[in-house]
Image (cartoon, rainbow, N blue to C red):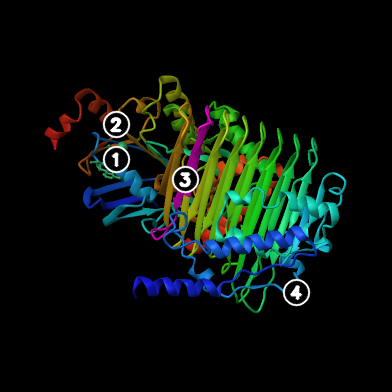
Amino acid sequence: MTQMAQANDQRKKQALHTPIVGPDYGSKWLADFREAAVNLFNRIGYPKADDEQWRFINLSPITQTAFQPVVEPGAVPPAELARFSLADRGFYELVFVDGLFSPALSSSRGLVGLIEFHNFKDAVGGHSERIGRYLGHELPTISNGFAALNAAGFADGMFLYLPAGVAVDKPIHILWITTAHRRPVVVFPRLLINACSQSQATVMQTFASLNSDHPVLTNAATEVISGRDSQLELIAVEREAPQAFHITNQAIHVHAGANVQTLAFNSGALLVRNNLNVHLAEPFAQATINGLTISSGNQRVDNHTTLDHASENCPSHELYKTLLAGSAAGVFRGKILVRPDAQKTDSKQTSKTMLLSDQAVMNSQPQLEIYANDVKCTHGSTTGPIDDEQLFYLQSRGVSEVQARSLLTYAFAGDVLNRVLNPAAREYLSQLTSDCLHQLHIDAVGS
Amino acid sequence: MALLEVKNLHAKVLGREILKGVDLTINPGEVHAIMGPNGSGKSTLASVLAGRENYEVTDGTALFNGKDILDLSPDERACEGLFLAFQYPVEIPGVSTSYFLKAAVNAIRKYRGEPELDAMDFLKLIKEKMKLLEMDQSFMNRSINEGFSGGEKKRNEIFQMTVLDPQLCILDETDSGLDIDALKIVSQGVNALRNSTRGILLVTHYQRLLNYIVPDFVHVLRDGKIIKSGDKSLALELEAKGYGWLENAA
Ligand SMILES: Nc1ncnc2c1ncn2[C@@H]1O[C@H](COP(=O)(O)OP(=O)(O)O)[C@@H](O)[C@H]1O
Ligand SMILES: [Mg+2]
């Protein structure tokens, strides 16, 4: 093919993918917002194969599938809801089914009056206007086609407003659950958090999809404004169905003295791409960003993070751990951007990978861009198998190979789990990790 | 029946033959010492018996209680009653000693058809053994061997051995890295395990340990073969004359 013909072909493909446009619910700002997003997508399209930020991931299964929006949300069998619900573990819970808020499945008693929370679809008048004011405020820092498609297409979303000084007593769980459909469907979960000064909360999102014969595409976006001296723990748990595609864009704006901690936990889906951008905008803003990935089979997991140090005296810590079995492949790209004003930046990045098979591969790279002179930035990356000496030691005391591998991989993941601040969240994630690992070893060793 | 019966054992590591026909029989109640210069294959013998990967047995047999153990996995051998105290115990950050040891105790109990210990019974068991080895309680909450001194690691090995109650104890250079006080405590722990049914195999380079744990038999391993066996006086002779003496004798 000539270059011209190739370009033509390319254009045709993209023409096939006109953005899905969600309803505007009678609100002018939303109609404008959608229009801007459509225009952006039409301009930039999907990430190109040669885009440095996307070249490790094959997007064609996504771009060549005609994913449809969900017209009518499906039913969630109680047993499936129970698999993912954390209401019994002491969480407030807000449930979205196929992208739409389901008050009936949610447990928000006690949350009303403590904070404000509104789903986009049903927010009216002043509430709606306020959502409009913040929405898209942070996400432009991540400018890619998927973020634009989310903005154009979301059917609903959640807005959490934490008033100044409020400490939310229990963690808030936002469960996005996609039911089984008779064709490939796309959902656009969207969460917006405005945490006012000195507020405190743990917010966990779970992205779940039920087993289906057709693939699901979750294209999620999360925007967070962390006000002065606020403390936020933001956890994203990806537990998609095995044939799902999962793409997230998350942008966090951290004000002076605020402390944000994140965790990206990935265990499901065929293909995962997480973009995280943390903007340390004012002095003494802090961020601790963590990741834990457990993958097997043919899973592909790509974590891209950016710690954007835009102001002085901001510490940041990053710890991403990846466990890969089968023929799984992982990517970690951690960018640390230290802008000229960001003197006295103290940033530490660590990426560690454990390969549980000879076929699993990891590509881990730091990316440092430093434009200030008085800074401390360290980074380290290790990739290796389970330590045979350790395995032999445990087995020589009577512990079976499956259990020994579980213990060692769990210990590897433990660093990340120990960092989780909220005890209920930590307990749940520890259990989930242990279950995932046990399954992994049973599949691998056979027992 | 012999507890351990090794016959004509040949083993390779990375394609190189290290054990070149070892014969060794240990009966219940006996304490054997294997001595020999560095590199003679003592640790290799211990590793092959415990089932370490990458050690290829090319000839010979090893029966434990009459059962061929060479095809068993390391954990199955442990469950059968074999214990190896390592020359260099590995550090395992993130795995707590108590969690691991409880898993080990219960794996072995399950294998033997005994009921598993609950948290209370387990605690009682380990408290008793810790006292014997003069160990601090806090130690159970630490990760396995992490940040331990050489002596602490060795003591931890003997502690685990007393908790797991094996039938055959193989101690690989347990005395190295121990000061005299620690050596006495560790020896006490081992001597407390001596009884009419258990077998003990001490692997050591130096005679010192044998002053505290007195063996019934002493063997000299050289270049992958046992070249001389005798009683405890052989160890003293070796100490006085050095391994060179045997070279001439052989
Ligand atoms: N894992 C191994 N890899 C390579 N060589 C080994 C390994 N284990 C032992 N050897 C070699 O086997 C020989 C015997 O070693 P070892 O059994 O440790 O002797 P000893 O314990 O008597 O000092 C040495 O030459 C040593 O280098
Ligand atoms: Mg040795």
Q: Note whether B204 is above or below A86 in the view shown.
A: above
Is residue A89 visible in the rendered image? The answer is no
Q: Does A265 sit left or right of B23 as displayed? A: right
For marks 1 and 2, give the CA distance. 9 Å
The secondary structure type at the circle numbered 3 is: strand
Q: Secondary structure at mark 4?
A: loop
Q: Is mark 2 within 8 Å of ligand 1?
A: yes
Asked if residue B152 is positioned above or below residue A21 in the image, the reply reads above
Q: Amino acid at mark 1?
A: Lys
Name the foreground residue: A395 vs A136. Answer: A136
Which residue has dot 1 on it?
A: B42
Quadrant in which residue A158 is drawn: bottom right
Quarter assignment of residue A147: bottom right
Spatial CA distance of label 3 from label 1 is 36 Å
Lateral position of residue B179 relative to residue A287, left or right: left
Extreme left residue here?
B248
> Is residue B143 found inside the magenta-colored segment of the image?
no
Q: Secondary structure at mark 2?
A: loop
Give the magenta part as a residue range. A333-360
Q: Nearer the viewer, mark 4 or mark 2?
A: 4
Q: Name the mark nearer the viewer: 3 or 2.
A: 3
Q: Is mark 1 within 8 Å of ligand 1?
A: yes
Determine crowd level at label 2: few under 14, some 14-19, many 20+ residues with C-alpha closer than 10 A: many
Tell me whether the residue at label 1 lies in contact with that at label 2, contact meaning CB atoms closer than 8 angstroms: yes
Q: Going from the N terminus, do you reach mark 1 or mark 2 first? A: 1
Up the image or down, A373 lies above or below A307; here it is above
Of the numbered discs in the image, which one, if any, rests on residue A72? 4
Residue at which label 3 appears:
A352
Across and down, in percent, residue A442 comes to 52, 61
Q: In the image, A39: left or right of B59?
A: right
Q: Which residue is mark 2?
A: B205
Whether the residues at callouts 1 and 4 have beta carbons within 8 Å, the answer is no
